[in-house]
Amino acid sequence: MRLAFFGTPDFAVPTLRALVEAGHEVACVYTQPPRKAGRGYTEQPTPVQAEAERHGIAVETPERLDDEAVQQRFAELNPDAAVVVAYGLIFPAAMLEAPRLGCLNVHASLLPRWRGAAPIQRAILAGDDETGVTVMKMDSGLDTGPIVMQERVAIAADTNAGELHDSLAEVGARLMPKALTALDAGEVTPQPQDDTWALTAPKLTKADRKLDWRRPAIELERLIRALAPKPGATTTLPDGETLKVLRAEVAPGPPSGTPVGKVLDETTFLVSCGLGSLRLIRVQRSGKSPMDTAAFLRGYALEHGARLQ
């Protein structure tokens, strides 16, 4: 098939690569414009742009899609379908309707559960034991289009967002070529979503990253996994230093009346919570590499009974 591909971050790269390897003609790749980053604060192409250039595919980086010239160039591509993976811009009706098979999106959840920008993080936060990938035909709503195909993925008790991200990216890469073939052959009919089961997945804010020791340990452990390895959940050490917590485990609770955030064991970094306690296993100091708790405690004098904020 002749395709247009829309995507920006690492999550989209495996799908683009799979489409090329499957022999589809990717006529053009659309991605976000390069942004300044790194030590030299120089413009960096998106991961999708870098992958497209490796395959010699033309790249467009429009700031917006509601520009008539952008829409006209897209229509002139005459694609059979547009494949969209974590692109980052809203599609106008003219572009949704232009391809013969429509615009197909890879979404990292089992829609209608977790519509929105942070489905991976929200699934872990909610304690879901499974998630998956949905290929849907896009409409004007936010992840509301009819479902073409889905595949389920288990969430293990210790899975973090980075690990789940990579697993789902590979599932999406495997699922999209199958969905395109089935849709083109008339072997599948997109099914409407049941809105009564819908849940939204808004982005987590900087305030959401802060560990609130008044909460149950099980919720804090999920938050840590939902934010690992980046950007990381945070707490404040007794001297005011911010510490990222990248891995932890729930432990039995302290005696009733124990202040929350209290260090119960300075040798294993056990901290009291609103319900239960949390043992910090892997952490990261500002400007340093991630390290196991044992290495951290060798370089930081943590006193018994100290309080984290």
Image (tube, rainbow, N blue to C red):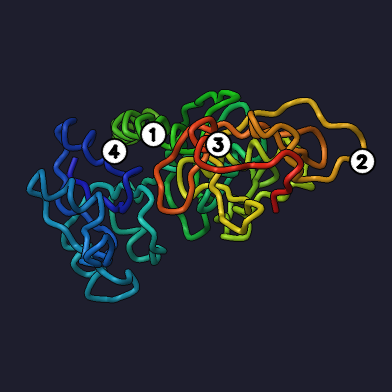
Element marked by disc 4 = helix
Q: Which of marks 3 and 4 is in front?
A: 3
Closer to the camera in the image, 216 or 89:
216
Three-letter amino acid code at the position of disc 2: Gly
Residue 155 at x, y = what percent?
55, 26
Q: Residue at position x 16%, y 58% from top?
A: 59
Q: Which circle's residue, 4 or 2, is located before the other in the chain? A: 4
- For image coordinates 82% across by 30% down, the residue present is 253
Q: Residue at x 39, y 46 (%)?
A: 105
**Relative to 236, 143 lies left or right:** left
Instruction: Tell me if label 1 and label 4 are in contact, CB under 8 Å.
Output: no
Secondary structure found at label 2: loop
The answer to the question of whether label 3 and label 2 lie on touching residues, with beta carbons closer than 8 A, is no
Depth order, front residue of 233/28: 233
- Position of residue 120 in the picture relative to residue 113 (left or right): left
* Residue 89, quarter of the rendered image: bottom left
Secondary structure beneath dot 3 equals: helix
Circle 4 is placed at which residue position? 15
**Residue on which disc 2 sits:** 257
Number of the label disc, if any, that sits on residue 297: 3
Viewer-closest of 74 and 235: 235
